[in-house]
Amino acid sequence: MNTPPSPLGAERTDGSSVRIGALVPLTRPGWVEAGRHLLAGLELAVGDVNDAGGIVGRPLELVVRDSAADPDRAAAAVDELARLGVAAMAGEYHSVVARAAAARADALGLPFLCSSAVLDALTDQPTDWVARLAPAQSHGWQIYADFLLGAGHSRIAVAAEPSVYWASGTRILRDHLAPRGGTVIELDMRALTPTAVCDALVDHRATALLLLVGHPEPAVPVVKAVRRDQRLAEIVIGAPAGQPEFAQWAALLGDDGAAIPFLRYLPERLGPLGVRVETALRERLAQAPSFVAFEGYDTVAVLADVLRSHGVDRARTAASWPGIAVEGTRGQIRFSRTPGISVWQWAWAPVQVVDRDPAEPDRFRILHTG
């Protein structure tokens, strides 16, 4: 791109590209596989927009920055993207990183459509600058808790690492399960080896273990230890954050990675747009696309619709969230103010609890919908 960046928020009239900034975890310690799927969805949608004539005749351009799961790096990237004159910002997978990006976007007056991060408190105060496609953590994890109760689990252990996201998830589970007779037992993964986790599960008579930890470490060693402990043959392992969604999970764990329920944000059946996008994503990724790839596609579809209708002025984009009605890959997308959520929220994307079929680990079984 050789043209100089426009002043902040300025409307270009020279026929140059309309730019959207994108935050994506592309290097460790970020979840690189999730980032690859998110970027594939974003890029595919940009290509489709441009094939259909762009933004009122101007090409749409994605300006990608690697967040690497680092909140400070993400905040600096938001500053850079704002200086480059992007019309809006998209993306991010990690909740803590998206929270830092959202705070910076709000401070700068840069519209940010968050693709995948679910932390309820994406900003400290209500803002008109930020909207989100992914269901809030409280919504999805309460559905997951209902699934556990329905499957007969009331003594639930959580193997958790320290993080705002994991702590929030534990609190949501406890608050939702306690009034219904459920107990949440916290296992501090800073202090426990995988073998010690197994001993604690036996001591606490837990019937389910939820992995609120990073992937592949320590999630993979914990799964292997539990699967090999004959005392725990009946225990259910769960991963509400979605670690088993990605191919690397199956590659590292094989049969041990099957029958581990997780949250996925897809409908039971895709409509025509979703089917077409799924086919294109599968070709682009050389594997089945995750729900994260669909979130990426839908992010650009929404922003392109806004930019066509309202131009590239940032304030007009932010003011347009409540009036949006866009057909996405997983249903019609509208934004509203939702109690307890500080940003404009799609309430809600479809939510499933699924697992990998033990008889065919590349196939997913839908266990529960919400």
Image (spheres, helix red, strand yellow):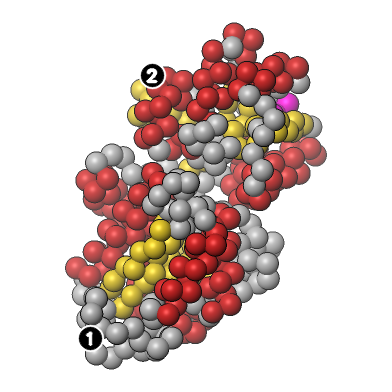
Where is mark 1, residue-wise? 15
341 on left or right of 135: right
Residue 242 placement, left or right of 66: right
Which of the two labelled residues, at mark 2 and mark 1, occupies the earlier sequence position? 1
Q: Position of residue 220 (x, y in %)?
A: 50, 28
The location of residue 362, given as percent across then percent down, is 35, 29
Q: Position of residue 298 (x, y in %)?
A: 38, 60
Q: Quadrant of the C terminus?
A: top right
Q: Magenta stretch?
A: 154-158
Residue at 55% across, 59% down:
71
**Label placed on residue 214:** none
Task: Work out whether residue 305 or residue 164 is closer to the camera in this orientation and state it.
Answer: 164
Q: How many marks?
A: 2
Q: Judge by depth and name the residue closer to the eye, 183 or 365.
A: 183
- Point 35% across, 49% down: residue: 36
Residue depicted at x 52% and y 24%: 221
Vertical order, 61 against 120 (above or below):
below
The kind of residue on which mark 1 rests is Gly
- Name the image quarter holding residue 308: bottom left
- In the image, 178 versus 107, the foreground residue is 107
At numbered mark 2, what does the secondary structure look like: helix, strand or loop? loop
In the depicted structure, whether residue 349 falls above or below residue 50: above
Q: Specify the farthest residue to the top.
A: 230
Q: Residues within 10 Å of mark 2 (few under 14, many from 20)?
A: few
Majority secondary structure in the magenta region: strand
Q: Which mark is residue 359?
A: 2
Q: Which amino acid type is marked by label 2?
A: Ala
Q: Residue at x 63, y 18 (%)?
A: 195
Furthest residue in direction bottom, as rendered: 13
Q: CA distance from mark 2 to mark 1?
A: 55 Å
Q: Is residue 78 magenta?
A: no
Looking at the rendered image, the disc whose residue lies closer to the viewer, 2 or 1, is 1
